Image (spheres, helix red, strand yellow):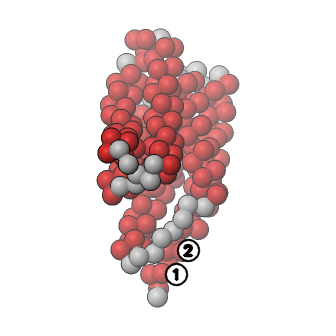
Amino acid sequence: MNLHKKNIPNYLTYFRIAIIPALILVFLLADMFGNWGYYISAFLFALAGVTDWLDGYAARIWQAQSNIGRFLDPIADKLLVATCLLLMVWTKQADLLPAIAIVCREILVSGLREYLAEIRISVPVSKLAKFKTAAQMLAIFLLLLGGGNQEGFCSIIGHILLWVAAILTLITGYAYMKIGMKHMAE
């Protein structure tokens, strides 16, 4: 295997992390750019989402999983989501309660996975959790795209999907905790 190919998934993860400061800057300066600021923010978020899918795909097809990739990939995802949610709550483009539910669940599940990994227990991602992630990512994209227009189609659908993602967050978080508690009690 070409050493360069083996590193592409990690480079994509690094790129995803590097997008975050650019996204913050564009988001904070969005008013200067008019609607383009929101479109650029949404584009950067979508680009980060594509790199997330691409790095996982590349790692699988090239059998290029690495310890740094296993460590950084979920962190990059959580940093991206938390950053966008915080920015949008701050500017009142997203509701506080679903954002808190999503961020708290991510922290809880990360800690749980870390604990379970120490005792050599793997918890696979459920289909419902994948659906939650899809709803969450689409919600954030639409809310970014909708910008300050709270009555626009993108914002309305984004708000609905964010609440759907938050409800799924609570359901999947509870399911993961149930599994974790079972192993902690043993």
Can residue 89 be seen here? no
Q: Are marks 2 and 1 in contact (CB under 8 Å)?
A: yes
- The picture places residue 98, in percent across and down from the top left corner, at 55, 47
Q: Residue furthest front?
A: 1
Which one is in front, 41 or 99?
41
Nearest the viewer among 141 and 51 is 51
Q: Residue at x 59, y 37 (%)?
A: 138
- Where residue 121 sits, quadrant-wise, is bottom left
For label 1, the SS is: helix
Q: What residue appears at the point 44 percent right and 53 percent down from the top-left corner? A: 63
Q: Badge 1: how crowded within 10 Å, few (<14), some, or many (20+)?
A: few
Residue 38 place in picture, x, y as percent: 49, 21
Q: Position of residue 42 (x, y in %)?
A: 50, 26
- Of 68 and 144, the residue lying toward us: 68
The amino acid type found where label 2 is placed reads Lys
Please tell me whether residue 46 is drawn above or below residue 52 in the rendered image.
above
Percent across and percent down for residue 41 are: 46, 25
Residue 21 higher or lower than 70, as above or below: above
Q: Amino acid at mark 1?
A: Lys
170 w.r.t. 181: above or below: above
- The residue to which callout 2 is attached is 178
Q: How many numbered discs sit on the rendered protein?
A: 2
Residue 29, quarter of picture:
top left
* Residue 159 numbered tag: none
Which residue is located at x 41 percent, y 24 percent?
Answer: 27
- Say what secondary structure mark 2 lies in: helix
Which disc number belongs to residue 182? 1
Whether residue 98 sits left or right of residue 160 in the image: it is left
Location of residue 17 (image quadrant)? top left
Instruction: Determine whether 90 is above or below 162 in the image.
Output: above
Q: Is residue 7 left or right of residue 134?
A: left
* Near-viewer residue (164 or 110): 110
